[in-house]
Amino acid sequence: MLRLKPVLSILIGTALLLGACNMPASNTPSTLDQNAIYTQAAMTVAVQLTQMAQGTPASPVPTDPIQQPTGDNLPTITASPTSTPLPSSTTLPTNTPLPTATATPPPTPTPLPCNWAEFVKDVTIPDGTKLATDSSFTKTWRLKNIGSCTWTSNYKLVFYKGDEMEGSSVSMPGNVRPGESVNLSVDLIAPSQSGTYQGYWMLRDPDGRFGIGNNADKPFWVEIKVVEPTSGIVYNFVNNYCQADWASGAGDLPCPGKSGQTSGFVIRLDKPDQENRQENEPALWTNPEKTDNGWITGTFPAFKVKSGDRFIADIGCLADNKNCDVLFQLNYRLGSPNLKSLGEWHEVYDGKITRVDIDLSSLADEKVEFVLTVLANGSSKDDAAFWLVPQIYREP
């Protein structure tokens, strides 16, 4: 604390000395009001003490001469202001504690539906494919399992709505686990009238249908444009060879196959090198199983034959297969397992090929499954047999 009394005495004394030094000589003590002088000095000191207590720099003591009141104009004395007491201590502001951070829980993941499919691509018959009236074709979709359940053989590809095109439900070929893809195929027949046709399909398990889309409730489809051919090639076996079911004595064969497979194989050749020349038209290389009297067959989807239709192809052995010795057969089915023959031809490597030209008028208005067959005549060594542009040609 400040020692106020010594300071007060010093300031009052200083004020009195300054006042006395600055008085005019003509003024005598008898005419001065000593009480006024003391009062003015005390007020000055009081103000400075107040400023010191408040932390404000003290005002300097005025050096102007004190005006002496005279006569009746003596000033009225007022009580000196009371100094503000100094605080006993300084209280620092208290910091407000920061709120405690609350951890935000991660969002709960949305569970995947059990059954959910994703369309990957059209493997065959892309939208807008042009097909002849009454022609058979196989539509294949590639679908991905993006649900949480495995698709089993209890799942089926089923027709939903639109143009059915004589299709029927197909079982899942095997287990398809989540994240895996599968090719699903259905055999169809183009309508008899020209126009655009669209059929919608879905998947089904024992509990109901499901498909693609955000809610697994949308179908996928096949769309074709059917035209009425008046003449020319109405069915090309080479272009549709993987729609056929290929087999040998070793069992079912993949399509396309790979050259050299001992179980037999079928491959498309766009520029076949034949025993008599090189061709610029496509052919099917049908190689029987590599065993004595081995064989290979390809059964094509049903085709509705019309009057005037003909089966035409050139047959023979491929170049550099000098031990080629095979039998070619053209067979067919009419809705039953029993095969019927349209012709058989024996071919060896002799630098010659054979033209096959069969009138199909006897099968007009029938839905016919054509079967291409090649058999080894004894040893199957070098039995590289080909069908050059096998087709059904319609007369004008």
Image: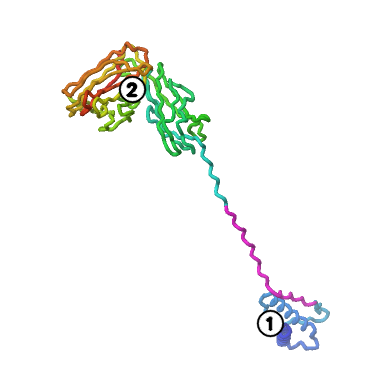
Asked if labels 2 and 1 touch by Cβ distance under 8 angstroms, the answer is no
Sequence-wise, which precedes: disc 1 or disc 2? 1
37 displayed left or right of 381? right
117 displayed left or right of 24? left
Q: Quadrant of the N terminus?
A: bottom right
Predominant SS along the magenta part? loop
Q: Residues within 10 Å of mark 1 (few under 14, many from 20)?
A: few
Q: Which mark is residue 235?
A: none
Taking depth in this image into account, of 327 and 60 the one nearest to the observer is 327
| Span highlighted in magenta in the image | 79-103
Q: Is residue 72 above or below residue 127?
A: below
Q: Position of residue 293 (x, y in %)?
A: 24, 25
CA separation in Å, label 1 and label 2: 131 Å
Q: Is residue 152 above or below residue 7?
A: above
Residue 360 in sight: yes
Residue 282 in sight: no
Amino acid type assigned to the residue bearing label 1 in the image: Thr
Q: Which residue is mark 1?
A: 63
Q: Position of residue 296 (x, y in %)?
A: 28, 25
Taking depth in this image into account, of 94 and 235 the one nearest to the observer is 235
Q: Which residue is mark 2?
A: 299
Residue 289, magenta (yes or no): no
Residue 91, magenta (yes or no): yes
Amino acid type assigned to the residue bearing label 2 in the image: Thr
Helix, strand or loop at mark 2 = strand
